[in-house]
Image: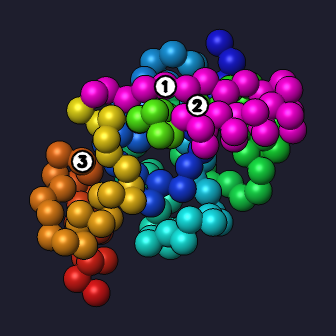
Amino acid sequence: MPKALCPGTFDPITNGHIDIIKRAASIFDEVIVAVAKNSFKNPLFAFPERFALAKNALKDVKGIKVVSFDGLVVDFARKNNAKVIIRGLRMLSDFEYEFQMALTNRSLDPGVETIFLMPHPQYSYISSRLIKEAGSLGAELKQFLPVAVQKALAKRMRK
């Protein structure tokens, strides 16, 4: 089975991300969870904290390793012999952007395929952006986030 790459900003990592990663790990022998150092998304958490939170949240998942990356995803996939990029699709609204990204990546490197996984229905509406917004308004987030991420987000929101 080829090696898979699951890239993202993970700002912060949610139970929806973890669901996709665990399911990818059940399909592939090795899944590289690649936390992007730089992001055009203006992340709430700095890279070291996003990386530490992802590493902590995934510490018990077999068959994965959490690493950092910078640059083009297809370049990182090629350097790590990953033949597959895993992307999660929550809602139909995700499809257009993800499809454009997959086609661009295919143009840049036809040897790297993109596979879309849908999350469990209980996570299908979760996004890091909405979690941050709800957290800033004082929402209880325990069903959406690992405990360490809940604490980090609550601490950040108090600042």
Q: Which of these two is toward me, 39 or 155?
A: 39
Image: 132 above or below 28:
below
Measure the alpha-carbon separation of dots 3 and 1.
Answer: 18 Å
- Residue 146: percent from the left, percent from the top? 26, 50
Disc 3 element = loop
Residue 147's disc number: none
- Residue 157: percent from the left, percent from the top? 26, 77
Asked if one can make out residue 22 in the rendered structure from this viewpoint, the answer is no
Residue 144's disc number: 3
Scheme of image coloration: rainbow
Image: 30 above or below 33:
above
- Residue 117: percent from the left, percent from the top? 49, 25
Measure the alpha-carbon separation of dots 1 and 2.
Answer: 7 Å
Q: Amino acid at mark 2?
A: Ile
Outermost residue, top side: 1
Disc 3 packing (10 Å; few <14; some 14–19; many ≥20): some
Of pointers 3 and 1, the one earlier in the residue sequence: 1
Q: Amino acid at mark 1?
A: Leu
Disc 1 element = strand
Judge whether residue 109 is colored magenta.
yes
* Magenta residues, start to end: 95-121
Quarter location, residue 122: top left
Residue picked out by circle 2? 86
For the residues bearing labels 3 and 1, Cβ distance under 8 angstroms: no
Of pointers 1 and 2, the one earlier in the residue sequence: 2
Q: Amino acid at mark 3?
A: Phe
For the residues bearing labels 1 and 2, Cβ distance under 8 angstroms: yes
Picture residue at 32% right of the left edge, 64% below the top = 132
Q: Which of these two is toward me, 36 or 101?
A: 101
For the residues bearing labels 2 and 3, Cβ distance under 8 angstroms: no
Residue picked out by circle 1? 117
